[in-house]
Amino acid sequence: MHLLVVNDLPVFGRVAGSVSYPLFSHMGIQTSLLPTCLLESHLGYTTTQVYPVNDLFEHTLTHAKQLEVPPNVVMTGLFHDKEQIDCLVQYIDDQHLPLYVDPIMGDNGRYYRFFKEPFVSHLLPLIQRAQLLTPNLTEACFIADIPYDSEPGHKFLNKLFQRLLAINSTATWVITGVPYAEQLITWVIRLHPETQANDFQAYPVKRLDRQATGMGDVYGQLIVGLTLNKRPISESIPFAQQFISKSLEQTNVPFEGLVYEPYLTDIQTFLSTD
């Protein structure tokens, strides 16, 4: 398997594309990283500048078709602009590649400052082609075009889930960070094509006292890597939740990213179990 990860690449911080090689290599996946933009550090630093690499982006996808072992699966994260998305959609369609999408756009009901306009309309061609999507609650609301609710109830979530399935009914949706009482819930939503029945599964964890930059990056890439290793989502989500919780205990400077390295061997142990 040869995975092409399309994401931003910061020089400093355990975030975005910088976590791809260690995570996926411990899952036995050959990984190549195509940066959408370069940054000094993550966007939490207000002084961080963004350096798009559109020429490299386009030429790399052309070159990928010439490789003796080209990518046979794609995962996407943050994009710099619509042109990059259009270029990648053409490449995926030409090569008939499966696609996994982490639609990175925002959190806590707001777009990241990186985006000068609502970006979700540009991402829709990828969202509609994906086999697996891992939005947080904010991004799910953007995709479904409904106002964000920081404490969503049953009626709100049902409306959200139905709208997401209307946009892509064949994908597995993994929606992270959904608050409920003292818990954060990861919701998995699917439509069974044979019966047209909805399947909504909840995976709760206790709300954490703190968070670290890049938690979503690590979580999303873990879910994709474990899925590519044929592990069922019902096992992958609890493992990823435990991995994040244990890593957070080792993280002394949360703003610089999650300290996950001490637990990388846990991934191999998990994958070696029946």
Image (cartoon, grey):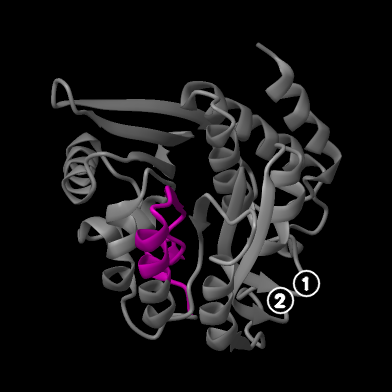
Residue 11 seen: yes
Pinpoint residue 130: horizontal percent, then vertical percent: 36, 50
Residue 3 in picture, x, y percent from top left = 59, 51
In the picture, measured across the screen, residue 186 lies left or right of residue 17, that is: left
* Circle 2 SS class: loop
Q: Secondary structure at mark 1?
A: loop
Query: Is 97 one of the magenta-colored residues?
Result: yes
**Marks 1 and 2, Cα distance to the nearest angstrom?**
5 Å
Any mark on residue 12, and which? 1
Q: Considering the image in quadrants, where does the C terminus appear?
A: top right
Task: Name the spot of residue 168 as percent of width and height, x first.
Answer: 24, 47
**Residue 236, relative to residue 151: is it above or below?**
above
Position of 67 with respect to 259 (left or right) is: left
Disc 2: which residue: 41
15 sits left or right of 73 in the view: right
Q: Which mark is residue 204?
A: none
The quadrant where residue 125 appears: bottom left
Q: Is residue 94 above or below residue 206?
A: below
User: Residue 138, relative to residue 168: is it above or below?
Assistant: below
Give the mark nearer the N terminus: 1 vs 2: 1
Q: Amino acid at mark 2?
A: Ser
Membership of 231 in magenta stretch: no
- Residue at the (72%, 62%) spot, across then down: 18
Q: Is residue 264 above or below residue 82?
A: above
Please tell me in which quadrant of the rendered image residue 193 appears.
Answer: top left
| Figure quadrant of residue 219 | top right
